[in-house]
Image (spheres, grey):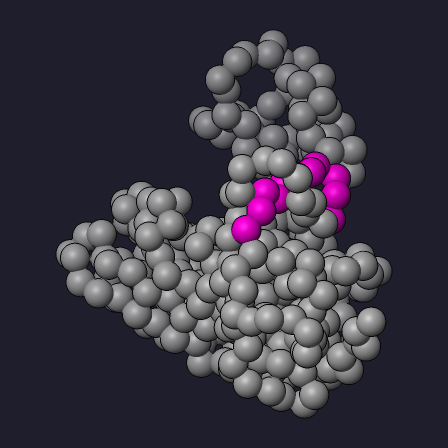
Amino acid sequence: MGEWLHHRLPERVDVAGMLAGERFVYDDLRPVADGDSYTPHTFVWFHRDLVDEAEVPGEIHVVHRDKRLIVVDKPAFLSSIPRGRHVRQSVVVRLRDELGLPELSPLHRLDRVTSGLLLLATQRRWRGPYQTLFQDNLVTKTYRALAPVRPDLELPVTVSNHIVKRRGSWQVEVVPGESPNAETSIELESFSDGCGVYRLSPRTGRTHQLRRHMNDLGIPIVNDPLYPVVQDIEVDNFGHPLQLLAAELSFTDPVDGSPREFRAVRDIPIPGAVDIQPKEQS
């Protein structure tokens, strides 16, 4: 078992020290010993050491709450789920404690740096019906973004292509010739501080889809740390929030058939030390 744990866990985990301290346990709470025979389909439990996390500024606004759903408007820089360096500073960990809902879990993805609406199920039994809505693209989603204005760009426009996220790469890439798996309608709604406020209506929900599509049009979203260029920004630097907001969600409730529609409390531009100097277009 010790050999398997060394193979299974990242190098930063002190497996030898945790084995010696009896910090790995089986389901019946017996400590795992280094020399125990490896047995497939065995659960091993442990509490990992958490690093200190800087508190993410901004309020989690509870937009709606009922027996099945919690809908929140989350601030930028707050992770939806605990992962990597963000555990306590995540929507799930914060709200499970604050709302007394130990089974609370998100029903879809929202990037850590993106602000706006996130739907969560209050209990495990409700996850399936609502997650299926997102998987089948039965949720109407509207985002708003602040980005430069290109006078030569004809809008509205629909961007459709095939994008993939390669392991180890920060950015997604477009694969020419493949059938489209990402589609976004983009229109210019208004102007703010020398930039445009865009309405983004994705038909699909691929990783970084909106950010990549805006960048490919030559109008990258203000304060995007990945597009067009990956920037080396400290994880606790909260000064320049990505100007992308999950603003509206609507769908037919899969449990009772009622129409559901939610709007974010926040608006564009997202407050902060925002650098909104648009880049010159050639």
Against 242, residue 109 (above or below) is above
Q: Quadrant of the C terminus?
A: bottom right
Q: Is residue 267 magenta?
A: no
Q: Residue at x 30, y 70 (%)?
A: 261
Q: Is 254 drawn above or below residue 32 in the view shown?
A: below
* Magenta region: 160-170
Q: Quadrant of residue 87?
A: bottom right
Q: Residue at x 55, y 77 (%)?
A: 188
Q: Residue at x 71, y 22 (%)?
A: 7
The answer to whether residue 82 of the structure is visible from this angle is no
Q: Position of residue 35 (x, y in %)?
A: 68, 13
Q: Quarter of the image containing the N terminus?
A: top right
Q: Where 62 sits versus 207, above or below?
A: below
Count of all numbered marks drawn on residues in the image: 0
Residue 162 position, x and y percent, is 59, 42
Q: Residue lying farthest top? A: 37
Instruction: Please tell me whether residue 150 is drawn above or below residue 125 in the rendered image.
Output: below
Left-right relation of 138 to 67: right
Which x, y percent locates residue 124?
Answer: 33, 46
